[in-house]
Structure formats: structure tokens, C-alpha cells
Amino acid sequence: MIFVTGGAGFIGANFVLDWLDLQDEPVLTLDKLTYAGNRDNLASLDQDPRHTLVVGDIGDTALVRALLKLHRPRAILNFAAESHVDRSIYGPADFIQTNIVGTFHLLESVRAYWNELGGKERENFRFLHVSTDEVYGSLAPQDPAFSESTPYAPNSPYSASKAASDHLVRAWHHTYGLPVLTTNCSNNYGPYQFPEKLIPLILHQALADKPLPVYGDGQNVRDWLHVSDHASGIRRVLEAGRVGETYNIGGNSELANLTVVEALCDALDRHRPTAQGSRRRLIQFVTDRPGHDRRYAIDARKIRKELDWQPAHSFASGLEQTVRWYLDHQEWSERVLSGAYRSWLEQNYAERRQEA
Ligand code: NAD
Ligand code: TDX
């Protein structure tokens, strides 16, 4: 059995669904079901005896220790986090609590469990920590992409909290010998992504014929990777990664935000043409994100060479699949957009539009 934290969120859910599509090894999911975690994402596993969902916090030591004792997983994969940069700017407290304090408690629970294992169980055990390229900071246009030896230089409360968690994971390996692996991945897109992140937000807005907010000049660059390619990278690292190592995972797909938003408009126009013409007319430049990192790019040579991993999707094919998924699952977006979320979104963009 593997133990997945944050498995009801975007990447965690895709990982769990792919895992159980490919093999029968059971999965125990622990998720706090914050606004970003949705039972809906794992609803197809409701009757599946290979999957168990427990609602709880990674920082709840009593719960996590009891689960570990009962289920005896061979690996823990830590996806649980507060993950949205804009939210971290307006309210960093939850990010410090879950990403730093929560990871600390999780590491301590896992260390106690691992210390009690013996023989092969102890030798084969892994703690895989899922992290981000944002810990490396921001690149200028001519800079080389982030490699595993790029110094950490986080710029947002979110990335600082993720950087702190990466350091804790590293220290638990060097100090206590915990067999850890860390992955640092670029921007993901795909099914079940909460519509606060760029791609699902733009799709949601455009389908409602509402303004499409592009921060600043729209020339900030992100390196996009389809979520199922991230999941396959994580599986490879879990299977064959060297203990104590970090692996960058990226799609070699650098694009300016404006280019992504235009591609989304064009894809929707093809699938759902409107009488008003191109959806590009909805693009609205709004006040920039404070401290907005200019460019991210991942050098994924290490995972490619060492673990023979590469993405299966091009950005074009991945985006097409993603657009179709959101078109076929509009009721999913409506359901996850609760009243509380809707007011955050409206307030955020009302303020930005006023300032712009
Ligand atoms: P998400 O916000 O969609 O999901 C996070 C999940 O964690 C949710 O289900 C939430 O309920 C759960 N959670 C939050 N706090 C918790 C707690 N204290 N205890 C238990 N569960 C808790 O995030 P995501 O986009 O799926 O990201 C997953 C991981 O991957 C995060 O660690 C993130 O930093 C990392 N990451 C994300 C991206 C990206 O592009 N989205 C890229 C690289 C790395
Ligand atoms: O409305 C928007 N308009 C806009 O121009 C939003 C929501 C975003 N943007 C810009 C900001 C970024 O340059 O688009 C880019 C992507 O924004 P997000 O989707 O918020 O992602 P980002 O800030 O790049 O962080 C994401 O990738 C790395 C994830 O949210 C992180 O969890 C992950 O670690």
C-alpha cells in the first residue's frame, strides 16, 4: 500500500486515479478537504476496495501515526499543501501552517513509523515530497533553466513555505536517515484543477463570456506540463530515484501567459463558436501580482537521463485534451466553486480591475 496526502486535490487526485488505473496496489488517501480538495475528484473510486479516503490533517500526529500503524504503507507521497500563490499573498498564515508546520509534523510521524520498521520493509520504505520549481525564484529571459543545483531563492509566501518544507525533508534525511525523495515540478495543467489557477480560470470565465484577467503585460513565462506526465515522473522517482536526491520535472514547454490565454480562446472558439466572434475580445490586462516571478523553466535532464522519464503530451495535445475535459465537466467547475470561493474570486478581480 501507498499513502498519499492531499490526494483529493488537483495533482494528488490525478496521481491516485492514474495509479489505480495502472496497478492494483492499494492507496490510502489523507486529505483535509480544504476548499481545494474535493471528494468529487475521487468519486469514481467510491466503491473501489483498493482505495480508502480519510479526511484529516497531515499535522494531526495522532491520526497519522494511527493510520501508519494500521495500514503499514511502503511509501508516503506528500502532495498536501496550500498551493495558490495569490492566496498566499493575501493570507500567508495557512501556508505557513500546512506547508511548513504540517510537513514538520508529518515528517516526525513518519520517522517514528519508519524507526519501528525492520529488514526489507525499512530498507524499501520511501517518503516522496512533491514540490515546485517556484522555490528557485525567477529567471531573466537569457538565464539557463532551473537545475537541481540552482540555489533556492523563493519570492512569494507560497514558494517560501514550499522551500522551507523542502529543507525540512532534506534535513530529516541527513540528520535522521529518513529515506526521502523530492521532486520539483513546473506548472501543471489538466483535469480537476481548481478554477483559481490560470488555465481552468480562463476556461471558466470564457465560457461565461466574462473578462479574462491577464496580470501585468502578459509576458510572464511558465513551463507547462500535463498533470499525468507529472504523475508518471513521480512514479518513476518513487520506483527508481536515488534516496536523498531531488529531481526536477518539467515539460520543456515555456510559454508567455498571454500566448496560453490566446490559445485557450482559440480552442474554445473552435469547440463552441459564439455569434460575438473571437473570445480574445474578453482579454483584460489587470494589475500585476505583487512580486510576480517573470519566468520559470525546468532543466529536466537528470530525470530523463537517470530514470528514462519523458512527458507523453505536447502542450498542444495536452491543452486540447484539457479543454475537452472542462467542456465535458462544466458541472464539476460549478460544484467546486462554492459561495465562499466565488466571493474571493470576485473581490480579487474587482480590486485588480479598479487599480488597472
Ligand atoms: P491543490 O491545492 O489542488 O491540492 C492540495 C490538496 O491538499 C487539497 O486536496 C487539500 O484539501 C489538501 N490539503 C491542504 N492542506 C492540508 C492539510 N493540512 N492536511 C491534509 N491535506 C491538506 O494543489 P495541487 O495543485 O494539486 O498541488 C499538489 C502539490 O504539488 C502541492 O504540494 C504543490 O505545491 C505541488 N505542485 C503544484 C504544481 C501546480 O502547478 N499545481 C506544480 C508543482 C508542484
Ligand atoms: O487570473 C490570472 N491571470 C494571470 O495572468 C491568474 C490566476 C494567473 N495569471 C498568471 C500568473 C502566473 O504568471 O498566470 C501564471 C500562472 O498563474 P497560476 O495558475 O496562479 O500559477 P503559478 O503562480 O505559476 O503557480 C503554479 O505553478 C507552480 C501553481 O499554482 C503552484 O502551486 C505551483 O507550485
Image: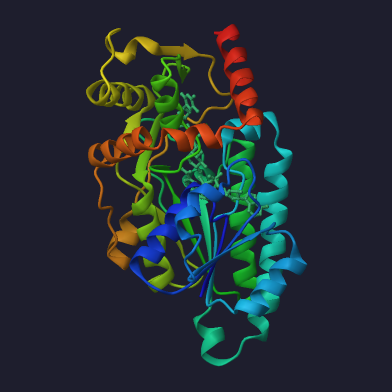
> In which image quadrant can residue 95 be found?
top right
* Most foreground residue, 103 or 272: 272
Q: Is residue 144 visible?
A: no
**Residue 338 to residue 248: above or below:** above
Residue drawn where x is 43% and y is 72% of the image: 242
Residue drawn where x is 45% and y is 12% of the image: 285
Q: Is residue 288 left or right of residue 313?
A: right
Q: Is residue 255 left or right of residue 199?
A: left
Q: Is residue 263 visible?
A: yes
Residue 26 place in picture, x, y as percent: 48, 72
Q: Is residue 356 left or right of residue 310?
A: right
Colouring mode (rainbow / by chain / secondary structure / one colour): rainbow
**For the view shown, which residue lies furthest in the bottom direction?**
119
Residue 124 place in picture, x, y as percent: 49, 82
**Residue 284 to residue 231: above or below:** above
> In which image quadrant can residue 291 be found?
top right
Residue drawn where x is 36% and y is 66% of the image: 236
* Most foreground residue, 66 or 166: 66
**Residue 340 to residue 135: above or below:** above
Q: Is residue 323 left or right of residue 167?
A: left
Residue 201 place in picture, x, y as percent: 46, 28
* Most foreground residue, 345 or 284: 345
**For the view shown, which residue lies furthest in the front direction?**
47
Residue 317 place in picture, x, y as percent: 23, 41
